[in-house]
Image (cartoon, grey):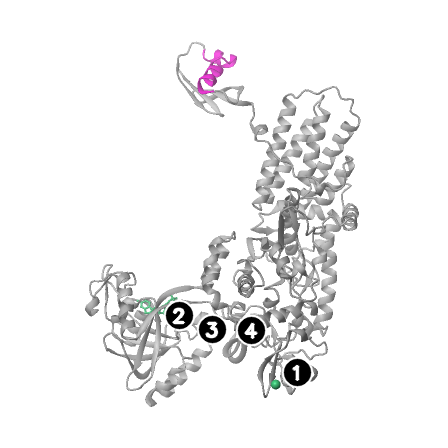
Amino acid sequence: MSNYGTKIDEKWQKRWEETGLYNFNENSDKPKLYTLEMFSYPSGSKLHAGHWFNYGPVDSWARIKRMQGYNVFQPMGFDAFGLPAENYAIKTGIHPKDSTEKNIKTMEKQLKAMGAMFNWDHEVITCLPDYYKWTQWVFLKLYEKGLAYRKKAPVNWCPSCNTVLANEQVIDGCCERCDSEVIKKDLTQWFFKITDYAEELLDKLDELDWPEKTKSMQKHWIGKSTGAEVNFKVENSNLSFDVFTTRVDTLFGVTYVVLAPENKLVDKIVTEEYKSEVEKYRETSNKCSEIERQSITREKTGVFTGAYAINPVNGKKVPVWVGDYVLNSYGTGAVMAVPAHDERDFAFATKYNLQIIKVIEGGDGTLPYTEYGTLVNSDEFDGLKTKEAKTAIVEKLESIKCGSGKINYRLRDWLVSRQRYWGAPIPIVYCEKCGTVTVPEDQLPVDLPYDVEFAPDGKSPLAKCEDFINTTCPICGGPAKREADTLDTFVCSSWYYLRYADNNNKNKAFDTDIVNKMLPVDMYVGGPEHACMHLLYARFISKALRDMGYVNFDEPFKSLRHQGLILGPDGQKMSKSKGNTISPDEYIEEYGSDVFRMYLMFGFAYSEGGAWSDDGIKAVSKFIERIERTLETSRTRINNSSETKTSIDKAEKELNYATHYAIKHISTDADKFQFNTSIARLMELNTALSKYLNEKTINDKFLNEIIKDFIKLIAPFAPHFAEEEWSLIGMDYSIFDQTWPKFDEKALIKDEVEIAVQINGKIKSKINIASNLDQDGIKEAALSDDKIKKSLEGKDVKKVIVVKGRLVNIVAR
Ligand code: ANZ
Ligand code: ZN
């Protein structure tokens, strides 16, 4: 039985804490390494296997870095505001503050039992006033810069959660949290102008050491599109509208235009005759989500408005339609339709019997032809290729003041206000006389009151709290009302990595010098689901703060990795209702935290995850026991040593090779977050060691050196266990102050290799040769081998083929 278990865990956790082993030393001359794991949401009452998979392996990685000479900063905290706690409160009646605080206590205890190198003195909890005060400050700074604004906007509304959702929280037209169908509602909302940073957010992606998939998701989300805007006049009126097109070269092929149903122009141009039909159409399309409306397979529908528009380049009169495949939130909410060269327009024109004019020559002539080609039916532009035609037509449009080149982004401004209770209050006051007024910095935080009726009824809970809502205007002192909405939790998490560096600052959100020294984050690890939300918001906020002079770096997260998902033993996502959840606590009780961590690292590819297996963790536990036996045997030998042997012979060389092989591969694999293969190399080294320990005469001094390296190699993966073993061989505390073993390439050159010798393709013998022997030398060695000589008796050697390092084949008759 193993001696290792929770007793050893507790012993070393206590010692580490007492000696402040992992405390961050700002004044160290070692290079800093800011390792960050996405902080957790204290929603469920406990840390689950997924948290563990995020934090455990990354801590092991950081421990290697520490031993390699880095000054590691690895803070931890809680993303504590947000819907789950509020929904839980609504269900149970337990106040979100109470449940959140309780959950945080539990999770802190669990995190400590993990024995990671967290810098707890830098902890950040976003729902505490000393943090959200500064979240409010960030809001004010953005507001001052014109990056926070309020406008009436159709918002995604979840009728079940009774709240507005950000675009990113709408999945296939449904609420991310409760799966109800999301509808559109017009509300006055606060936005952050992330679109101002669209170009830089896109541009700088190339420089980041992030998973390609994540970068490409952000790229898509930002959705840059280069084209032109063209102005169409409405016939018999002084109204006009712009369309956005990526194919201005097809302008002569426009046979109708389409407005989004929500486009304000519709009411102004629709003729009496078509009014009721248009109205009816708008009502049905309002029920559809944007995603559905964009779906390729959905039939395109529309209605005629009775109005006509004039194509600016040729004066052609084209009908104006309303169709819901045109989104009001993209481009200008209006499109020019070119059925000959666009699939959608082609289907629409065919369905409603609209004209089709070919203006691009190419392909086999069938329509729609959507590729680039040569212009026809386009007056003076005939004969131009698409590319040159785009430039020429834009020039023409500019000269007649009817259009220009234009870049569009899919990215929308970030909607940050929530009609919910459990969030940071927005530091804004509305005064009848002075209008919208910011709460002065010295009056922050705007406290979130405790006694609030938080059950949702579509209104902001804070609006019903008289004490909160009624205030005085900071400018004129007259009666005023506070903003009743709270901030999206993604605002809290958009800057927490800055606060970690200077979390106790009472006067500022953070000190610029400290943050500039500590950031950017060198390694950020968390779930891939944050690609287009948190990871984009954080980049935006960093850049905005940079432009205000508060930080001096462009990107907050230099390197990024994602962990995979740990599934239940049945291969399904863990959930209480399925009864397939794995509770880390019970396993740790039984096996100790190192075995749990090591199983997570050994049993799964880090970026992939997979199904939990009890056999897997048992196997890792057995492995720890095997190591323990190896170390015990070696200790006994070394302690009772009456050393006579000092020479290094074959067995030593082999073990030395195995050690350096392990050092090399554990180091490089762990650097690539390939922890499973790192541990496989540890296992091999243990096997090599136990084989060596079975030799009758062994070199004890040599063994002792190897054992020290071996324990150091184990240390990051099984920190408590290794610290214990380190003390058992009488070494000074702590192993984590030791230097990570370096490998010697020379030790990795085997001076002798065994190769097979074949005659006519059949193995006849195996010979040992010097690894640096040349072709001729190998041939000679093969032909002079006794067995080979015997087999070749009476035969003629026709040819000798040498496959270096592997075999020799002799062709003989
Ligand atoms: C005329 C045209 C002709 C177009 C042609 C394409 C091919 P991306 O690349 O996504 O930016 N469009 C513009 N605004 C739209 C809106 N609000 N809702 C739906 N569709 C819209 O796509 C730009 C193209 O999508 C634009 O170029 C426009 O159709 C359409 F042979 O204009 B095109
Ligand atoms: Zn006022």
Find out if the beta carbon at label 3 lies less than 8 Å from the nearest ligand 1 atom.
no
The residue sitting at 66% across, 42% down in the picture is: 67
Q: Provide the secondary structure element on which disc 1 rests.
A: helix
Residue placed under numbered mark 1 in the picture: 469
779 is within the stretch colored magenta: yes
Q: Provide the secondary structure element on which disc 3 rests.
A: loop
Position of residue 31 in the picture relative to residue 121 (left or right): left
Residue placed under numbered mark 3 in the picture: 289
Of badges 4 and 1, the one in the foreground is: 4
Find out if the beta carbon at label 2 lies less than 8 Å from the nearest ligand 1 atom.
no
Residue 432 horizontal/vertical position (percent): 59, 88
The answer to whether residue 813 of the structure is visible from this angle is no
Q: Provide the secondary structure element on which disc 4 rests.
A: helix
Residue 639 horizontal/vertical position (percent): 79, 28
Say above or below: 53 vs 356: above
Residue 811 horizontal/vertical position (percent): 41, 18
> Whole-Å distance between the Cαs marked 4 and 1?
23 Å
> Whole-Å distance between the Cαs marked 3 and 1?
34 Å
Position of residue 654 in the picture relative to residue 94 (left or right): left
Mark 3 or 4, nearer chain start: 4
Mark 4 or 1, nearer chain start: 4
Mark 3 or 1, nearer chain start: 3
Q: Amino acid at mark 2?
A: Arg
> Whole-Å distance between the Cαs marked 3 and 4?
34 Å
449 is within the stretch colored magenta: no
The magenta stretch spans which residues? 774-792
Mark 2 or 3, nearer chain start: 3
Please tell me which residue lies in front, 140 or 637: 140
Q: Amino acid at mark 4?
A: Glu
